[in-house]
Amino acid sequence: MQLAICQLEAAQTLYAEPGKFLWKTQNVAIETRLTRPVGNQAGAPSAAGGFLQKALDVGKRVVAGEHLAFQYFTPAGGGGLAAFAGVMPGELRAIELDGTKGWYTEKSTFVAAESSVNFDISFTGIRTGLRGGAGFVLEHFTGSGTLFIAAAGNFVELNPSKYGGKIQIHTGCIVAFEDTVTYAVERIGGLNAQTAMTAVFGDQGINLATLEGDGIVLIQSMNIEALARSLHPYLSSSSEEKDSLLGGLL
């Protein structure tokens, strides 16, 4: 399990997804807000254009199934430390945004970012989400500063432009990609017997996510959907086994 230990200078602010914070030095204050950062300078409060803008920000996150609030970390009286990590064993990476390109990430991938990094929700379309089986919401980060993301397993970095312009990926393996890359979902093959066999016995359905264009794509080595299916029998039977064991002892 990798983690990021961040050195925050005086008046520098970092925001994080709730549940990703691990520990901090005493002089780093934590503040929870419903508003998201938009073009903030270091140490500036989160920006929101009044009540309606706040309601819009919160509403988009509700639809996306995300946390309603962000946690903001700012040191006082000098520099301080704050540590963050993902929620599953795997790799954590720092991405440096310079204002020329943004990044799209899958839900639950975001860990923390400098307050100068803008956050927004991007809807890929209900049809695309339903076909992909992994929802229709991506998180979009722009601006300048450091962005921390984490996912399961190890990261593989590819650029579709070096492999014929398009990469087909299982939807459970996508981590993040630059916003110069186009995301879509497409069916594998035509409507025939082989496609039906793939859908029923191939364990991935007949749709794959496609990433097309010139930009960096990060793929995780662990298939989250397959991991969830493999753990489900143990999670669903744990309480029954416990009751059976206690019944035998009593």
Image (spheres, grey):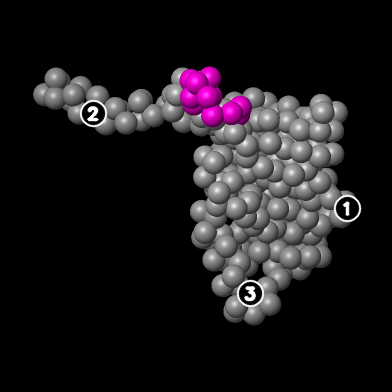
Q: Measure the alpha-carbon separation of dots 1 and 2.
A: 54 Å
Q: Residue at x 68, y 49 (%)?
A: 112
Quadrant in the picture for residue 27: bottom right
Quadrant in the picture for residue 119: bottom right
Q: Residue at x 77, y 30 (%)?
A: 157
> Which residue is tagged 3?
53
Of the residues under marks 1 and 2, which one precedes in the sequence? Answer: 1
Please tell me which residue lies in front, 212 or 245.
Answer: 212
- Which of the numbered marks, if any, corresponds to residue 45? none
- Res 207 visible: yes
Q: Position of residue 54 (x, y in %)?
A: 60, 72
Please tell me which residue lies in front, 174 or 48.
Answer: 174
> Which residue is tagged 2?
240
Task: Give the crowd class for mark 3: few <14, some 14-19, many >=20 residues within 10 Å.
Answer: some
- Per the image, label 1 sits on a secondary structure element best described as loop
Quadrant in the picture for residue 114: bottom right
Q: Nearer the viewer, mark 1 or mark 2?
A: 1
Of the residues under marks 3 and 2, which one precedes in the sequence? Answer: 3
- Which of the numbered marks, if any, corresponds to residue 100? 1
In-image side of 61 versus 176 (left or right) = left
Question: What range is drawn magenta here?
Answer: 188-199
Residue 192 included in the magenta stretch of the image: yes
Q: Nearer the viewer, mark 3 or mark 2?
A: 3
Q: Amino acid at mark 1?
A: Thr
- Per the image, label 2 sits on a secondary structure element best described as helix
